[in-house]
Image (cartoon, grey):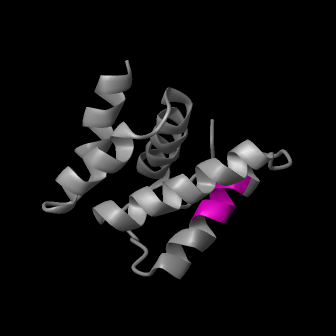
Amino acid sequence: MRSILISALAGCAEGSGRARSRRFLQGLSSDELQFIAEYLGACILESDGDSPHSREELAGRVMEFQAAREHALSADEEHKMVLLLEFLCRGGVSASLRARPS
């Protein structure tokens, strides 16, 4: 399962960002990989074609995603949000963030 998540998530990165993203993802736990996959899946389902361009825009949209989860953030979830933002910025992943978890 872990290797499948890594391959799928790395495949979301753009061009030259794929190898760097794969190396980054290999250092994450299965739980952290699933959090990133949930986020990207929600982005795909909710996509309106608008893609954030700056780290600040991405951070704001990650916060919107987490707020939609309707519960207080634990230290673990804050950590996962940092990893998600880093993955998105490292790999050049362009995904709209009007995501609402199912």
- Most distant residue in the left direction: 15
Q: Could you tell me residue 37's position as x and y percent?
A: 45, 39
60 to 43, vertically: above or below: below
Query: Which residue is at the front of the view, 25 or 4?
Result: 25
At horizontal 59% and vertical 61% (from top left) the residue drawn is 62
96 to 33, vertically: above or below: below
Question: Which quadrant of the view contains residue 102?
Answer: top right
At horizontal 56% and vertical 53% (from top left) the residue drawn is 99
- Which segment is the magenta one? 62-66
Image side of residue 8 versus residue 37, left or right: left
Task: Specify whether residue 44 is in view.
Answer: yes
Say if the magenta span includes residue 64: yes
Query: Which residue is at the front of the view, 28 or 45?
Result: 28
- Most distant residue in the top direction: 1
Query: Which residue is at the front of the view, 67 or 22?
Result: 22
What is the magenta segment's predominant secondary structure? helix
Q: Could you tell me residue 74's position as x and y percent?
A: 80, 45
Quadrant of the rendering where the N terminus is positioned:
top left
Image side of residue 31 versus residue 5, left or right: right
Say if the magenta span includes residue 88: no
